[in-house]
Image (tube, helix red, strand yellow):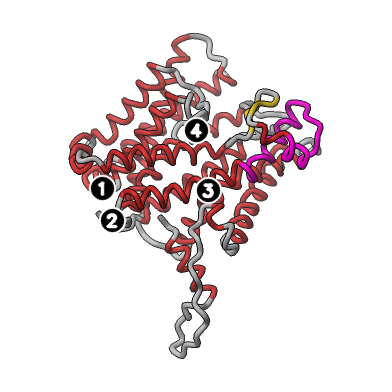
């Protein structure tokens, strides 16, 4: 099924990755583990982090599932779809593990584990050990775990779609999640999964030892895949987004109140621990449902910036955490106030991401390594007299390439 493009979901994907970048800058300042840390972590910074922490990654898998369904409709078959997705995901993953991620590991070893050798020595002699150093597995994918999981989930969902039952699965999805059930059923599932049954706190990012995360993210990806073909469920999310937003805000307010009363998770008893778990995991799906409903209701319109931003999202994701860690390593410990450190890190990260994308998209061999399509052969310049932009003009090629890469 060839689908009409949903610009609202494009904007939601762009916004979700932008929030992820801001969140990872914030990781430098909270007392949680990260590759580089400020000298004086701020306990209060945990409160704004929890505005997006419960749902940001699940949302990314939902919108990725939606985009995958939109793309599969443009392909001649499941095999062609899997070849395309494998190339677009695995090459950036391998390139990222070999080139982009190692500076993060070196900074972490240097600042937190007493490693004394320089970066070049580390990269040439220690990083590709296929073992551990100071308990850190190398080579590693760090933040690129999302790409590995996304590829595996793509294989699973595409395999189901290729089965005879795949044609009936959409009708089942429409019935199962129509109306109020689009809000309630996923919310109940996530609360039962993580607040009641498993009490999950953190993902391991180990593909083979991250079972609870798979129980969360694979259904989210499948939901996005089904949502892309379901007008009834999308209409339900659009109809109920206000109610979902109220629930999400209420859960976040509860969570913030608990952390104000007992900073750094120092809860006094089982009742407060249970309230924290219910608020944290209860916030997740209502926030996602509200954002999808808002995207359907208000954001489903195009803009001159959307094609470029949609294309830039993946390169931004690949490079952003390395920029954060390297710049953080350069400025931390120099007597800069935390607020100024945050501003410098955020500005440097945005600038570094743009530079990585704008330069990388012009280098043919680098494009597939940073998640962009291989550039097509360029036609020779031919003059035009009608005042329109010639297809051989670099501006036309750039805009056309961006339009092609939106999926």
Q: Give the Cα distance between marks 1 and 3.
A: 29 Å
Q: Which residue is mark 3?
A: 91
For marks 2 and 1 on the same chain, the one whose residue lies earlier in the sequence: 2
| Crowd band around label 2 with a 10 angstrom C-alpha radius: few (<14), some (14–19), many (20+) | few
Region rendered in magenta: 98-125
Q: Give the Cα distance between marks 2 and 3.
A: 27 Å
Which quadrant holds residue 135? Answer: top right
Label 4 residue SS: loop
For marks 4 and 3, give the one nearer the viewer. 3
Question: Residue at the spot x=21%, y=34% of the render?
Answer: 176
- The main secondary structure of the magenta stretch is helix
Label 2 with label 1: CB-CB less than 8 Å: yes
Disc ID at residue 53? 4
Q: Residue furthest top?
A: 269
Q: Which residue is mark 1?
A: 229
For marks 1 and 4 on the same chain, the one whose residue lies earlier in the sequence: 4
For marks 1 and 3 on the same chain, the one whose residue lies earlier in the sequence: 3
Q: Which residue is mark 2?
A: 3
Kindly tell me whether residue 246 is visible in this rendering: no
């Amino acid at each position: 099924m060839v689908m009409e493009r949903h610009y609202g979901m494009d904007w939601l994907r762009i916004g979700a990755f932008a929030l992820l970048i801001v969140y990872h800058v914030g990781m430098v300042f909270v007392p949680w583990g990260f590759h580089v840390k400020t000298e004086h972590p701020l306990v209060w910074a945990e409160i704004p982090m929890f505005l997006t922490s419960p749902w940001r990654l699940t949302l990314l898998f939902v919108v990725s599932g939606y985009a995958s369904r939109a793309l599969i409709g443009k392909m001649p078959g499941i095999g062609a779809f899997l070849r395309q997705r494998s190339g677009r995901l695995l090459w950036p993953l391998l390139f990222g593990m070999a080139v982009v991620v190692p500076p993060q590991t070196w900074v972490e070893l240097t600042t937190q584990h007493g490693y004394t050798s320089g970066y070049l020595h580390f990269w040439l002699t220690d990083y590709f050990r296929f073992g551990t150093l100071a308990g850190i597995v190398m080579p590693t994918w760090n933040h690129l775990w999302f790409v590995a999981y996304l590829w595996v989930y793509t294989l699973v969902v595409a395999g189901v779609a290729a089965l005879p039952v795949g044609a009936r699965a959409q009708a089942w999805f429409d019935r199962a999640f129509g109306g109020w059930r689009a809000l309630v059923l996923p919310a109940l599932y996530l609360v039962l999964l993580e607040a009641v049954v498993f009490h999950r706190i953190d993902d391991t990012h180990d593909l083979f030892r991250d079972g609870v995360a798979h129980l969360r993210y694979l259904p989210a990806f499948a939901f996005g895949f089904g949502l892309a073909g379901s007008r009834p469920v999308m209409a339900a999310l659009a109809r109920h987004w206000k109610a979902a937003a109220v629930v999400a805000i209420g859960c976040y307010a509860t969570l913030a109140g608990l952390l104000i009363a007992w900073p750094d998770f120092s809860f006094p008893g089982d009742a407060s621990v249970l309230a924290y778990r219910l608020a944290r995991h209860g916030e997740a799906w209502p926030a996602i449902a509200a954002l999808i409903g808002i995207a359907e209701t208000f954001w489903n319109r195009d803009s001159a910036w959307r094609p470029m931003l949609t294309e830039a999202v993946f390169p931004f994701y690949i490079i952003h955490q390395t920029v954060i860690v390297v710049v953080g390593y350069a400025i931390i410990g120099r007597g800069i106030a935390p607020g100024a450190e945050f501003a410098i890190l955020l500005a440097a990260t945005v600038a570094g991401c743009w530079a990585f994308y704008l330069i990388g998209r012009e280098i043919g061999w680098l494009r597939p390594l940073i998640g962009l399509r291989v550039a097509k052969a360029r036609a020779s310049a031919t003059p035009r007299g009608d005042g329109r932009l010639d297809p051989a003009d670099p501006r036309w090629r750039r805009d056309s390439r961006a339009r092609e890469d939106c999926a």
